[in-house]
Amino acid sequence: MPVPKRKKPRTRTRSRKAQWFNSARTPAYATCPQCKKPKLPHHACANCGTYDGRQVLTVD
Ligand SMILES: [Zn+2]
């Protein structure tokens, strides 16, 4: 098996990790079709309590 002659450059390591950091640190969110506020995807909206056009939560 061939062995690498030298370590990977820092820029290689950092640019590879940057892909992971961007996807892991950016919280995914969707926009509520009712109130247009940001909400978690596949969750009922915390603001208006609707999911898929139906009222599923009682909101004060
Ligand atoms: Zn909403």
Image (cartoon, rainbow, N blue to C red):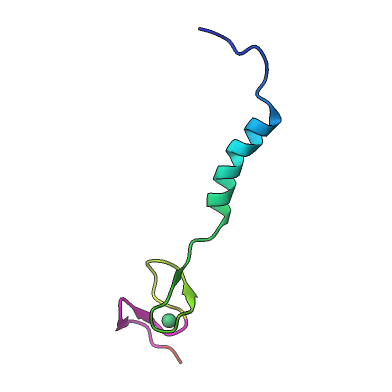
As for residue 57 lying within the magenta part, the answer is: yes
Image x and y of residue 28, in percent: 49, 61
Left or right of residue 32: residue 23:
right
- Give residue 16's position: percent from left, percent from top: 58, 36
Dominant SS of magenta comes to loop
Is residue 28 positioned above or below 12 on the image?
below
- Answer with left or right where residue 39 lies relative to residue 22: left
54 lies left or right of 2: left
Task: Give the residues drawn in magenta, as a range.
Answer: 47-58
Whether 54 is drawn above or below 7: the answer is: below
Nearer to us in this view, 30 or 55: 30
Task: Residue 29: give x, y in percent of width and height.
Answer: 48, 66
Which percent across, then down, holds residue 1?
50, 7
Q: Residue furthest right?
A: 10
Choose between 51 and 17: the one closer to the eye.
Answer: 17
Is 20 drawn above or below residue 56 in the view shown? above
Residue at 68% in and 26% down = 9
- The residue at 30%/76% (across/down) is 52
Quadrant of the image where one finds ligand 1: bottom left
Report the residue at 58% width, 10% height from top: 3
Q: Quadrant for residue 10, please give it.
A: top right
* Position of 23 relative to 39 (above/below): above
Residue at figure coordinates x 46%, y 79% from the top left: 46
The quadrant in which residue 41 appears is bottom left
